[in-house]
């Protein structure tokens, strides 16, 4: 069976750095951390931890107040990123004949969805004594809210689905969108992910697992240190990223700018433990992505690692990379950009896939921030990017996402023009 080629024609991001693609990527390459200290008092017990917020984002200004009022924050972020990706792809918001988009769709990923709506409702009922909740509570909180709104706003009559698999949610969404276009089931799909997890309950839940990195005041900026010998855990964040995937011939026929080609998607399950990663499962996913993309280990010029800065997770990922890449591993550039933009949970795979595509577009590589002089011996064996690199050849790259529950997703992209800039 012949598979269709898949082009990446649109990119959109809502991040703590703002929504400009080039500025977002430049700040990552420069090693600029967006992590700051979060302290709240209006909660049962004061909350103090490093966190990443999209502080400059105004949903009313971006989406319009009537539309924004129907959504929770993860939908605000997701819809804004999707709209930007759509515009970047050169596609019109409105069409005269809606039937032209009957096999265009949206496949989205989120881990926690509209948890803010539900937590607010529980607070109103149990603490504030309210007997009735907002009639919008369910539709604001449902995990498929983003793909529903994107489909309605853009007139997409094809697939509309959401994927929830913890931290691999949006990577799986992108992979499944890729497969649909490959198979001929769709011509254009908006895909990606969003999460906004700044709730008291979520923060306390992660804190209870002892996975949150400490850091107050100015020290918060360097709290997340993947692969470092003194790493102490992850930093939660919020944000969204979107990609427009398109059948290659369809994109060329309309004269679209093609950022990169998506060539592979590997998925696997560790099937061994809920929260303890297993290198064997990760190896299967990485090899599957390479095989599907007809890529040899030496073809890969960059890996955006899952790298969360947890004590157990980081060495397992490096072990998997060493196993797959063998003799090429010491020359394999690897970085974990969560050190700067934080862990976006269900949106992590999307923002890291977008970063990976940008590395191909811009021929530049972001570093793992705060790592110089601190590499854990158990994480050695690859070419850790201690500083950003510019003007380097990046022919093909991988984006890794590994999640609680053992869900693994690896996305493979190939450059289409080594001299083009976005």
Image (tube, rainbow, N blue to C red):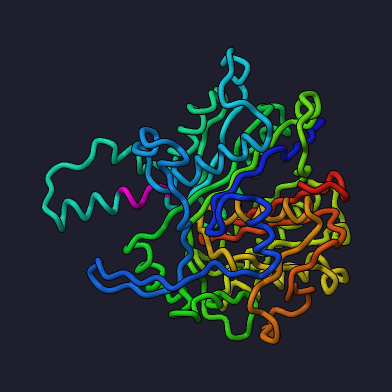
Q: Inspect the magenta stretch and tell me whether residue 301 lies in it.
A: no
User: Does 76 appear above or below 308?
Assistant: above
Residue at the image point whose x is 64% and y is 42% from the top: 243
Q: Quadrant of residue 375?
A: bottom right
Going by the image, does 162 lie left or right of 189?
left
Q: Quadrant of residue 310?
A: bottom right
In the rendering, at what x and y percent does residue 66 appear? 36, 33
Span highlighted in magenta in the image: 113-117
Q: Which residue is at the front of the view, 332 or 278?
A: 332
Q: Inspect the magenta stretch and tell me whether residue 116 lies in it.
A: yes
Residue at the image point whose x is 47% and y is 55% from the top: 56
Residue at the image point whose x is 47% and y is 74% from the top: 211
Quarter of the picture containing the N terminus is top right
User: Does 343 appear above or below 95?
Assistant: below
In the rendering, at what x and y percent does residue 363 appear? 81, 57
Residue at the image point whose x is 88% and y is 49% from the top: 419
In the rendering, at what x and y percent does residue 227 appear? 65, 77
User: Does 189 appear above or below 292?
Assistant: above
Q: Is residue 173 visible?
A: no
């Amino acid at each position: 069976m012949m598979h269709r080629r898949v082009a990446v024609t649109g990119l959109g991001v809502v991040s703590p750095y703002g929504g400009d693609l080039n500025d977002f990527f430049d700040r990552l390459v420069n090693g600029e951390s967006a992590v700051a200290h979060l302290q709240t008092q209006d909660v049962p017990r004061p909350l103090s931890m490093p966190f990443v917020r999209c502080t400059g984002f105004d949903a009313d200004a971006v989406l319009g107040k009537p539309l924004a009022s129907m959504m929770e924050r993860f939908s605000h972020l997701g819809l804004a990123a999707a709209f930007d990706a759509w515009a970047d792809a050169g596609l019109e918001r409105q069409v005269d004949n809606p039937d032209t988009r009957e096999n265009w769709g949206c496949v989205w990923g989120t881990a926690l969805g509209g948890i803010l709506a539900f937590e607010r409702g529980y607070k109103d009922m149990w603490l504030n004594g309210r007997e009735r909740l907002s009639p919008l509570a369910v539709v604001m909180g449902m995990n498929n809210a983003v793909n529903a709104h994107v489909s309605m706003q853009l007139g997409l009559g094809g697939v509309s689905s959401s994927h929830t698999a913890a931290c691999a949610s949006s990577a799986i969404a992108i992979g499944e969108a890729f497969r649909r276009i490959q198979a001929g089931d769709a011509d254009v799909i908006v895909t990606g992910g969003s999460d906004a997890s700044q709730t008291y309950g979520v923060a306390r839940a992660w804190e209870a697992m002892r996975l949150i990195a400490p850091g107050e005041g100015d020290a918060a900026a360097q709290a997340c240190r993947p692969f470092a010998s003194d790493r102490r855990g992850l930093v939660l964040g919020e944000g969204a990223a979107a990609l427009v995937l398109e059948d290659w011939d369809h994109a060329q026929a309309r004269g679209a700018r093609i950022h990169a080609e998506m060539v592979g998607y590997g998925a696997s399950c560790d099937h061994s433990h809920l929260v303890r990663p297993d290198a064997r499962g990760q190896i299967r996913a990485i090899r599957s992505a390479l095989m599907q993309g007809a890529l040899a280990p030496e073809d890969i010029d960059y890996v955006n690692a899952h790298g969360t800065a947890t004590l157990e997770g980081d060495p397992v990922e490096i072990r998997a990379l060493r196993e797959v890449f063998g003799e090429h591993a010491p020359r394999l550039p690897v970085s974990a950009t969560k050190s700067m933009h934080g862990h976006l949970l269900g949106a992590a795979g999307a923002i890291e896939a977008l970063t990976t595509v940008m590395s191909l577009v811009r021929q530049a590589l972001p570093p793992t921030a705060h790592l110089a002089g601190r590499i854990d011996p158990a994480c050695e064996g690859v070419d850790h990017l201690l500083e950003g690199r510019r003007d380097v050849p990046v022919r093909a790259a991988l984006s890794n996402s590994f999640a609680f529950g053992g869900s693994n997703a690896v996305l493979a992209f190939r450059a289409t023009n080594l001299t083009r800039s976005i």
